[in-house]
Amino acid sequence: MENEIKKKVMLSGIQPSGDLHLGNYLGAVKNWGARAEEFDCYYFMADLHTLTVRQNPAELRRRTLEQLAQYIACGLDPEKNTLFVQSHVHEHAELGWILNCYTMFGELSRMTQFKDKSAKNADNINGGLFTYPALMAADILLYQADFVPVGEDQRQHCELTRDVAIRFNNIYGDVFKVPEPYIPKAGARVMGLGNPTSKMSKSDPNGCVFLMEKPEDIARKFKRAVTDSDTENCVRFDRENKPGVANLMNIYAAVTGKTFEEIEKEFDGCGYGVFKPAVGEAVIETLRPIREEASRLLADKAYLQKVYSDGAEKASYIARKTLRKVYKKVGLVEKPF
C-alpha cells in the first residue's frame, strides 16, 4: 500500500466523438497499459468535451461504451487503472467553472485548436468551444497529476494548465500540483494515409485506420496510401522529401518494433507495391486481437457498467478532496453534506 501512495499520477482522456483509430492507439493508448506498474493512472472518456460540437445523443452513448471496451482491449486493466466517464464525476464541470475565472481571455484566444475548430464549425462557435481548455485544466488538476501523456499538438493545452495552476497557487498557496507533459518518443505522431503532412484524423476517414475496422478495409487503405511522386520507388526514411514513405515506415516500426534501418534492409529493392501491403498486413495482425476482445466486451454490458461505476467512484473520491480545498481557498461556504 505504501508503494501505491508513492506512485506518480498520470492522467489522460480521449473524446468519444468518433471511433478510436491507429493514431490514437500508437500515439497514446498502446503505451498507457505498460505504465500502470510505475504510475497511478487515470484514463477517461472525455464526453463533456465532445459537446462543443453538436452530437447525435444515441451515437455519443454508443461510442463512449465502445471506447471503454477498446481501452480495456488495448491493455488497460481496470484492476490496475482507473477508467471512468468524465460526466460521471461532476467535479470536472465544477472545477472547470472555477478555473474559467482564473484563465485569461487572451490565453484562450491564442489556443490553436480553438482557431482550427472555429474554422470547421463556423455555424456553432459557442462559449464551450472557447473555454474548453479551462475544463481540460480541471480534468488534470483535479487528480493532482504529475504527468499528462500528450501528443505534440496538445502541448499548448498542457502549458496553459501549468500557467493556470501556477497562477492559482501564487494567489492561494500550494493547492495544485503543476503537471508535466509526457510525450512518448516513438509512434507519437501518426499521419494520415491520404495526406502524410497532416495527423491521422477521423475527419478524413479514407486516410484513417480505425481499431474496429474490417481487415479487408484496412488492407485497401494501405494499398492506396500516398507514398511520393519520384521515380525512385525506394523504401527509405526521409521525412522531408518522402513524407508518405516515412509515415508508413513509422507505422511499421511501431507495430513490429523494427528500426528504420532494419525496415530499409527488409524492403531493399522491393518497391512500394510490396511495402504498402506488408505494412497493412502488420497493422491488421496488430489490431485483430484488439477488435476481437473489444467485440466480446461490448456484449457484456453488465461488466462494462461495473468498470465505469467503480472507476467513477474512485475518481470522485480523489476529485472531491481537491475540489473541497479549492472551494475553501476561494471563499465558498462548505457543503453541509
Image: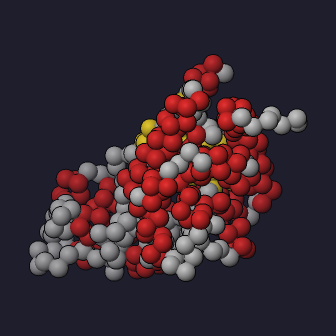
Q: Residue furthest top?
A: 2
Q: Is residue 131 visible?
A: yes
**Image vertical order of residue 286 relative to residue 91, above or below:** below
Residue 97 spot, x, y in % from top left: 65, 50
Question: In which quarter of the view is residue 82 placed?
Answer: top right
In this view, the residue in front, 292 or 95, is: 95
Judge left or right: residue 305 versus residue 110.
right
Q: Is residue 256 visible?
A: no
In this view, the residue in front, 188 or 127, is: 127
Color encoding of the figure? secondary structure
Judge left or right: residue 269 versus residue 38.
left
Residue 106 spot, x, y in % from top left: 44, 55
Residue 232 spot, x, y in % from top left: 11, 74
* Quadrant the C terminus occupies: top right
Q: Residue furthest right?
A: 337
Residue at left offset 59%, top offset 30%: 172
**Image vertical order of residue 14 relative to residue 138, above or below:** below
Question: In which quarter of the view is residue 276 placed?
Answer: bottom left
Residue 114 spot, x, y in % from top left: 47, 64
